[in-house]
Amino acid sequence: MLKITEKLQETAAQLLESGEVDLVLGYTKGSEQNQTIPYIATSPEDAKNLVFDAYSEKALSKYLLQDNYKNKKTALIVKGCDHRAIKLMLGESRVQRSQVYLIGVECPGMIRKGEPSPFCLKCNYNTPAEDEVDILLTGADVPDALKEKNRTHQEVFTEINAIEKMSEDERFEYWKRQLNRCKRCYSCRNACPVCTCRVCIFDRENPDIIDAAKDQLAQHQFYHVIRAFHVMDRCVGCGECSRVCPEGIPLHLLNQKLQRDLEKFYGSYEAGMDELPTPLSYAKADEPDFFGKEEK
Amino acid sequence: MIQENFEPKIIAFCCNWCSYAGADLAGTGRLKYPENIRIIRIPCSSRVDPTLVMRAFQNGADGVMIAGCHPGDCHYDTGNYHTRKRMKLLRNLMEFMGLPSERLLVKWISGNEAERFKNTVEDFTEKLRKMGVYDKARDLRCSK
């Protein structure tokens, strides 16, 4: 067994026995090969089923917003990207610090379908800072595929650069092909750890912001453009949106493109690592004005 | 598709304090500007968010214009700073998805610039007439 899994099981059993937490939210082995799924442990016996390995991809912080975690103290396993999302939630008072016990883990990166996950290759915050979590566990086994990691900042955007080089019609065809498969299942929104609105704009009934029509490209464009906009400066780069999409639409490209533009024009900002408020919630007089000169 | 006698439809969001007054002045001064424009009066140009712009394109607009006060002169102090930040990013995203971003125009027009308002509308209409009908972001049920 991996060292980190042992430490994790010990810590969890201890926390549950002493009654310091009501439940531990972590991962366990799934029924298929190389499958790790989320798991709730409520007693020291359950704690023996917890694992942490290179297949534990799910961002657990999103579960905290559900109703059944409200009045309980929860311990949860946080990887780097998860920790950034939790810090955003704490900074915006969506969860209380006294409600969570953070078990930080040294994340080795995740493997998806035999290949290292592209989001992990560019990650620069895989381990939460020790003074910001309640306990930090190290000793994860780094799989061989992930030893060669860390793309440079520029390499991260190769897919976006490739799309930008296409002509306008080609770009439209590319996105039309991708977005026409959208079923509007809202998995991307449900899995995103920074999509934290109490009532999502797409769930409101009055006014009815979005039409349920599934066969109109215009409605798919609408949904994805608006969601990318709402999430843009808060995106932590966990890749959940693309992972959970049942049609395999590369949604992360929209978010990454907006993040890069935000960085280019308004200064770099890493959600969860830099101080709040996020760049889009304020606007200053000294920002560049692109519409000032007489154009076109 | 090239349509003969194609008249583009422009939706203009004009802020109440500056650009709407400018448009009004163009009217009282009897300056003639094209009738393709449909003006919607909003309290400040920052009222416009991506939802409204996308909705306008879906429902049949060929061009969207957002007219606000000059930066520094906003009636609500900082509204137009938000506008220019958001709209710049929206244009880039539209460009990325293959929707031409020249169809979204942002212009600063103040209350006494009637001539500027007239020129903007004329230039924009001419440009859209050349670009043709905008069917890439249109909800097809609207054209029935």
Image (spheres, rainbow, N blue to C red):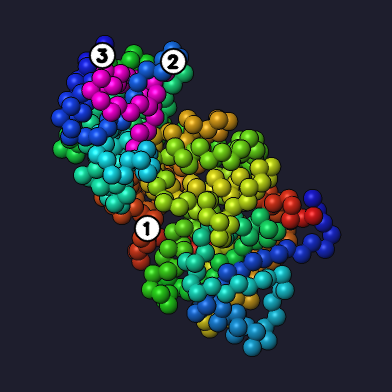
Identify which residue is drawn at 34% across, 31% down: A123
Query: Can the viewer see residue A65?
Result: yes
The residue under label 1 is A281
Q: Give residue A2's mark.
A: 3
Are marks 2 and 1 in one subunit?
yes
Residue ID at (26%, 36%): A74
Sequence-wise, which precedes: disc 2 or disc 1?
2
Q: Which residues are magenta?
A: A35-61
Do callouts 2 and 1 mark residues in contact (Cβ within 8 Å)? no
Same chain under badges 2 and 3? The reply is: yes
What residue does disc 2 label?
Answer: A31
A212 shown above or below B83: above
User: Which quadrant of the figure contains the C terminus of chain A?
Assistant: bottom right
Q: Residues within 10 Å of mark 1 (few under 14, many from 20)?
A: few
Please, is residue B53 above or below residue B76 in the view?
above
Secondary structure at badge 3 equals loop
In this rendered view, identify the residue nearer to me: B15 or A19. Answer: A19
